[in-house]
Image: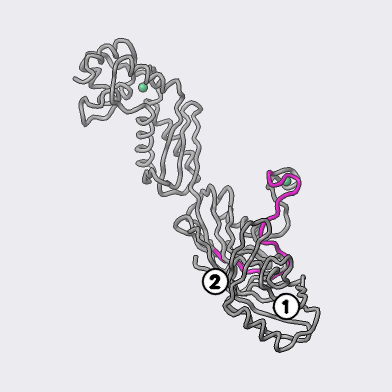
Amino acid sequence: MQNGENLERLLKESTLCNICLGRQFPLELKGLDNPSKGLELKKKLGVRDRPTKVCNICGGMMSSIEKYVDLVIKALDEYEFESLLIGARIPTTIVEREDHLRAEMKLKGGETLKANFTKELNRKVSYKLNVEIRHRRPDVTAIVDSLLDMVEVTSKSIYVYGRYIKTKRGILQKRRRCSECRGKGCPECNLTGYTSTDSVEQRLTEPLLTLFTAGRVKFTWIGSEDSSSLVLGEGRPFYAEILEPRIRRPKRVKTVMKKVGDGISVKEIRILDGRPKEERQFTITVQSSFTLNKRITKKNVKKLEETFEGASIRMMPPNKKSSTTKKIYRLTVESAKSRYLQVKVECDGGLSLRRFFTGEGGEVIPNVASILEREVTLDEEKPFDILDVDFEA
Ligand SMILES: [Zn+2]
Ligand SMILES: [Zn+2]
């Protein structure tokens, strides 16, 4: 018998529960689970099995596993999930007790108390709740603290893709950080870390938090616009990461997302299977009307359209070391009256449109002002509007 000579000594010198005993002898009585194995080994040596909560290794933790099963199930009560993983934090003193005993008795090869405990928990909870145990990226993870009898639940983020339309000027895209606390949260901002200034982000955040009963939402915008710009057509795409969701498959997503309020509407919304791709190339169609300091001629108009037909534009963003190249696919002059011009531009996303029109700072070359040889003044009430964003989600 493997480790056999030690069994007698082990049983004489310590009190172990059947599970902790059985676990020390992986090669014995194969096919039996740890508790039955422990019981058999005790019988073999004529040791009376006292139903005891005292165990020199686990201190009774293994025999009260049902208590932890209930704790986990209760902690998961409000969560919706299809896969689960349970882990455990076990006091070092317990882990050391087992290590010490194994060294002393020269016991080899058995799984650890922690492995035994979590395996049992996972097995029992998954059976009771009829959910799959998944080791890689489960929907929810529950960590049992065996000392404090507490369970910590975390849930995997959900990603949402959508498009919004903005038909009212003066709404920011992003939430503005609270200037008092710089985003940490203070009484001034109701602990949110943000000002209550109206924004697309804020309008979208609340219904998303409600739908998913989530802790937080993080947005990735496909481009940005001025607060005084409109977003028309199919709308501007965005991704939202829903952190710590309790609901994973909300119903009525479209209905709820319709209620984002006056001036903003959600054109498209859907839950993604996983994290969205990092590549975020897109093109954009914008319209702008501006005033020039001198009237223009037909020749100017023609030159403008020709210059930007399939043109490469160099952009030198402030505080950046190298320039980037953006493409203008087409610039169309829609109306030209004396010193007043309305244009439509199709270009790569990420081009600084304000600088492209006015040429300010000399950071975008060539630009509309430089080609027209005029000063360009945007209408600050409506500098430019987004007509379309072409993006493959
Ligand atoms: Zn034990
Ligand atoms: Zn604050």
Residue shown at 77% from the left, 74% from the top: 377
Please give left or right for residue 184 compared with residue 83 in the image: right
Circle 1 SS class: strand
Residue found at the far front of this picture = 322
* Residue 330 can be seen, yes or no: yes
Q: CA distance from mark 2 to mark 1?
A: 22 Å
Tell me the colour scheme of the image.
one colour
Please give left or right for residue 204 compared with residue 245 in the image: right
Instruction: List x then y, in percent, for residue 281.
Output: 53, 65
Instruction: List x then y, in percent, for residue 212.
Output: 54, 53
**Is residue 370 found inside the magenta-colored segment of the image?**
no
**Few, some or many residues within 10 Å of mark 2 (<14, 14–19, 20+):** some
Magenta range is: 162-184
Q: Is 328 or 134 nearer to us in this picture?
A: 328
The mark found on residue 390 in the picture is 2
Please give left or right for residue 206 compared with residue 141 in the image: right
Above or below: residue 169 compared with residue 33 = below
